[in-house]
Amino acid sequence: MIEKQHIIDRFISYITIDTESDPNSDTTPSTEKQWDLAHALVKELTDIGMKEVSIDQNAYVMATLPRNVDHEVPVIGFVAHFDTSPDFTGANIKPQIINNYDGKDIVLNAEENIILSPDLFDDLLQYKGQTLITTDGTTLLGADDKAGITEIVSAMEYLIQHPEIKHGKIRVGFTPDEEIGRGAHKFDVEKFGAEWAYTMDGSQIGELEYENFNAASATVKVKGKIVHPGYAKGKMINSMYIATEFINSLPMLETPEHTEDYQGFFHLASIEGAVEETILKYIIRDHNMAKFEARKEAMLQMTFDLNTQYEREVVSIDIKDQYFNMKEKIEPVMHIVDIAEEAMKTLNIKPIIKPIRGGTDGSQLSYMGLPCPNIFAGGHNFHGRYEYVPVESMIKATQVICKIAELVALKK
């Protein structure tokens, strides 16, 4: 039996270490403070009895649980990231533990009137009677993805303590900088040495994902011409107006706030503008590769059209691919998804197989030769003050890891 308080204590020990990543840094990890948790994990993995514990010059942590069967079993892995999102502060997290949740509003911060309410977050209601860990309303929680780390370490510890559960060689890996899209960039797949792996980085209990967005970024620069506004007729070119034309040329309902499931979008992430120059930063997302390419082409066409309209180069665009849909790499080895699904069903967890409206380390790792579906870690409302995680979901995720290890060893 996986002990509840032990899971709580381990999770809290992780989230109280600030590991926020920084997209403006060019180092790996992007922040020095990520080393604090990385080194703590090295010590903990060693203490619980893991073998081949290592940390490299970029803070990637790996370890091995040796097999305890005589027959050959595929080497599998479990991966999570230890950085937290720069979208909201992860410093001085003060978690609150809500025992036997009653389905009503949770006051996160009375002074600032910050309420976690099922009226806005109806997923809360499926956890009535359970133990929730929330924020105090002033930080994020860090369940993304310290819940995943908790589950992987706890599962390895449980398997070590229960040698009657038969399993093959298991590799675990913990990465920095996933939240800024770099978690897999320096991951040594060859050193990791697994045939396949699972990221423990999903949300609600039961999630099992092997599809994600194709993703690109686009920087649009619009050039204008500044002259004295009193004498500007026929001379001034206001880049902000042209930028507005560009924005309005894209489908207004194909944005994040109007799309769901497999629907892609254009997301205007930031605008910085003056008469002389305006810079638009977009992200482009779509599960379907043909539609993804069409979205990029639409932005290129609009750039061409505006330059033609103004008879000069007023707009330039730089589009960069970020990651691709791992479905292409997972479908040829769908048995790895089937095993995870079987593990959940065996534990009376209803699998929720759906596309990720984002990306994970697993999407990049899959293209690096390590097929890597994504499994729930249990948290909700990531990257903000309303983040929470049910402890029972973390326990179930820990059990799923153990069951996958057992099933892989049984499938000779």
Image (cartoon, rainbow, N blue to C red):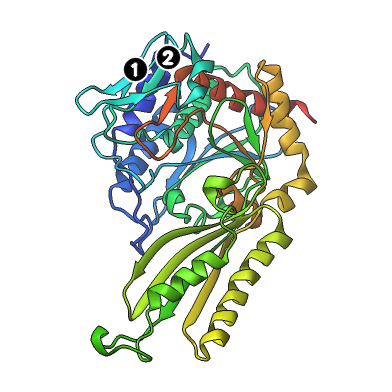
At label 2, the amino acid type is: Thr
Which residue lies at the image location 49% right of the left edge and 80% below the top edge?
316
Is residue 247 in view from this perspective? yes
List the single residue furthest toward the left: 111
State the image coordinates of residue 214 (x, y, percent, origin top left).
Answer: 63, 56
Q: Secondary structure at mark 1?
A: strand
Within 10 Å of disc 1 (Cα), the crowding (few <14, some 14-19, many 20+) is some
Q: Secondary structure at mark 2?
A: loop
Residue at the spot of label 1: 97
State the image coordinates of residue 410 (x, y, percent, origin top left).
Answer: 75, 25
- Do the residues under discs 1 and 2 have CB atoms within 8 angstroms? yes
* Label 1 or label 2, whichever comes before in sequence order: 1
State the residue in front, 363 or 36. 363
Relative to 315, is 71 on the left or the right? right
Residue at the spot of label 2: 131
Which residue lies at the image location 42% right of the left edge and 9% below the top edge?
102
CA gap, disc 1 to disc 2? 7 Å
Q: Is residue 249 above or below residue 131?
A: below
Which residue lies at the image location 62% right of the left edge and 41% below the top edge?
197
State the residue in front, 183 or 60. 183
Splitting the image into 4 quarters, where does residue 298 fall? bottom right
Splitting the image into 4 quarters, where does residue 408 fall? top right
Relative to 283, is 403 on the left or the right? right
Q: Is residue 318 above or below residue 27?
A: below
Q: Is residue 297 above or below residue 382?
A: below
State the image coordinates of residue 301 (x, y, percent, origin top left).
Answer: 62, 76
State the residue in front, 68 or 233. 233
At label 1, the amino acid type is: Ile
Splitting the image into 4 quarters, where does residue 406 fall? top right
Q: Is residue 403 above or below residue 67?
A: above
**Disc ID at residue 299:** none
